[in-house]
Amino acid sequence: MRPSLRAKAISVCEDKIAKKGEGVGLSFYAFFANKNEDPDLLMEAAEWWIKTKALDHFEKAVKIREMIKSGQ
């Protein structure tokens, strides 16, 4: 995962956790606006989420943040 996507994903996770609590879930779509402005970046996130990590559609933001911070 490229550094810009890592930083954005961590930021989104932290924002969601701050607003909705530690139990909040999200999908990789949360890292993007409703427009598909960067298909390559979207596919990179999708591949990491679906193929590499085999995550469910929704996961706890805390879990995703920690996975990304630890370099998984």
Image (cartoon, rainbow, N blue to C red):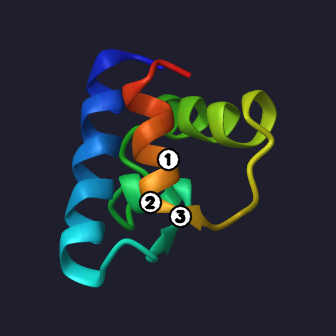
Dot 2 alpha-carbon crowd within 10 angstroms: few under 14, some 14 to 19, many 20 or more: many
Position in image of residue 47 (x %, y %): 69, 32
From this view, report whether residue 42 is shown above or below residue 30.
above
The amino acid at mark 3 is: Lys
Tags 1 and 3 touching, CB below 8 Å: yes
SS category of the residue bearing label 3: strand
Q: Which mark is residue 60?
A: 3
Q: Which mark is residue 41?
A: none
Residue at the spot 51% in from the left edge and 29% down from the top edge: 40
How many marks the image carries: the answer is 3
Q: Which mark is residue 61?
A: 2
Position in image of residue 4 (x %, y %): 27, 25
> Which one is nearer the viewer's eye here, 72 or 34?
72
Q: Which residue is disc 1 drawn over? A: 64
The amino acid at mark 2 is: Ala
Position in image of residue 5 (x %, y %): 35, 31
Tags 3 and 2 touching, CB below 8 Å: yes
